[in-house]
Amino acid sequence: MTAVGDGGSLRKGQWVLATPPLPRGGLSEQVAVPEEHVFPIPNAMSWYEAASMFITYQTAYYALHRCGRIQPGEVLLVHAGAGGVGSAAIQLGVAAGARVIATAGGPEKVRICQELGAETVIDYRAEDFVQPVKEVTEGRGADVIFDPVGGDTFDRSRKCIAFEGRLLVIGFAGGRIADAPTNHALVKNYSVVGVHWGLFRRLMPERVRKAHRELMHLYEQGAIRPLLHQTFPFDALPEALGLLAERKTWGKLVVKP
Ligand SMILES: NC(=O)c1ccc[n+]([C@@H]2O[C@H](COP(=O)([O-])OP(=O)(O)OC[C@H]3O[C@@H](n4cnc5c(N)ncnc54)[C@H](OP(=O)(O)O)[C@@H]3O)[C@@H](O)[C@H]2O)c1
């Protein structure tokens, strides 16, 4: 941080990450940001790790702990486990003491999920995940399912969720918003839980600050480490966005203005 205004609690030179609100955004060499959008980070954290940390880990943390009430020993199924929020969810699930199953598209992403700590990984382009999840859980299904994909992935997830499971609706990367039949939720005793971290942040900013402190603690312990696909110079931004759209990336892509 190169300068601070009067009356704030931060100091010049402090190592921070900032989430500049639109219309300014973060793709600039320097930006003025209100203190409420600035978060202290450890000195050991690199700039590209800091850039990769915030929304993905905050979302996964909020989803797993507050929305999913995950408990040690429970089974967590993470879809698109090599993606931005998925890779954070695998690491945070392991850190919470859960047994983590992941799905991913293709052998390279499968390997990445294994390296992140998932004990079982299913290539959902090659095979359906329902039966493998049932086998690993001895027929019980997953207690918590983290779903950033939606569509068919959501529909199939309902087939392998445990009694009193929590099916977390994170996003719709697959392009279709699935319907959730309420009779199915009733007969199997599971919950479909919407996760909108941005609204949580707006309504409960102090909880977000607390989660940030806990995430930084986990980082310092080595329990979480942002997964970086690549850094790009500013001029290569269109290339970075193209790779993301083509599903050829894992973790985060960071652009250096
Ligand atoms: N609820 C919230 O508060 C919140 C917060 C942050 C993000 N999100 C949402 O979560 C979703 C994932 O975000 P992210 O940052 O993790 O994105 P990402 O890094 O691009 O990962 C998305 C992953 O989804 C999988 N996928 C499946 N079908 C796809 C398709 N048709 N096109 C593209 N990808 C597809 C891909 O993994 P495979 O190739 O392995 O299938 C891809 O890596 C987005 O919908 C985003 O809007 C929600």
Image (cartoon, rainbow, N blue to C red):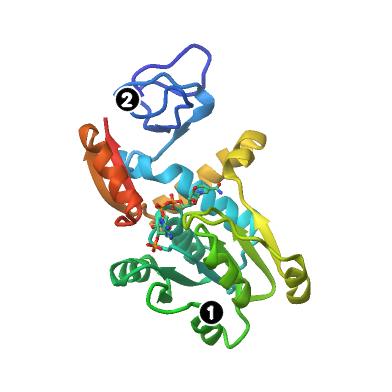
* Location of residue 134 in the rendering, given as x and y in whole percent from the top left corner: 56, 84
Q: Distance between the residues labelled 2 and 1?
A: 45 Å
Q: Is any part of residue 121 visible from this angle? A: yes
- Which image quadrant: the C terminus? top left
* Location of residue 91 in the rendering, given as x and y in whole percent from the top left corner: 44, 61
Picture residue at 61% right of the left edge, 76% below the top:
159
Residue in the foreground of this view, choosing between 151 and 248: 151
Left or right of residue 132: residue 179? right
Q: Residues within 10 Å of mark 2 (few under 14, many from 20)?
A: few
Residue in the foreground of this view, choosing between 175 and 61: 175
Q: Mark 1 points at which residue?
A: 130
Query: Given the image, on which type of amino acid does mark 1 rest?
Result: Val
The answer to whether the beta carbon of the residue marked 2 is less than 8 Å from any atom of ligand 1 is: no
Q: In this view, does 93 lie above or below 61?
A: below
Q: In this view, does 168 lie above or below 212?
A: below
Picture residue at 41% right of the left edge, 18% below the top:
32
For mark 1, give the secondary structure. Answer: helix
* Location of residue 246 in the rendering, given as x and y in whole percent from the top left corner: 32, 54
Query: Given the image, on which type of amino acid does mark 2 rest?
Result: Ser
> Quarter of the image holding residue 221?
bottom left
Residue in the foreground of this view, choosing between 226 and 212: 226
Q: Is any part of residue 72 visible from this angle? A: no
Residue in the foreground of this view, choosing between 232 and 52: 232
Left or right of residue 172: residue 29? left
Q: Name the residue under label 2.
A: 28
Picture residue at 48% right of the left edge, 27% below the top:
21
* Location of residue 130 in the rendering, given as x and y in whole percent from the top left corner: 53, 79
Q: Quadrant of ligand 1?
A: bottom left
Give the mark nearest the N terminus, 2 or 1: 2
The answer to whether the beta carbon of the residue marked 1 is less than 8 Å from any atom of ligand 1 is: no
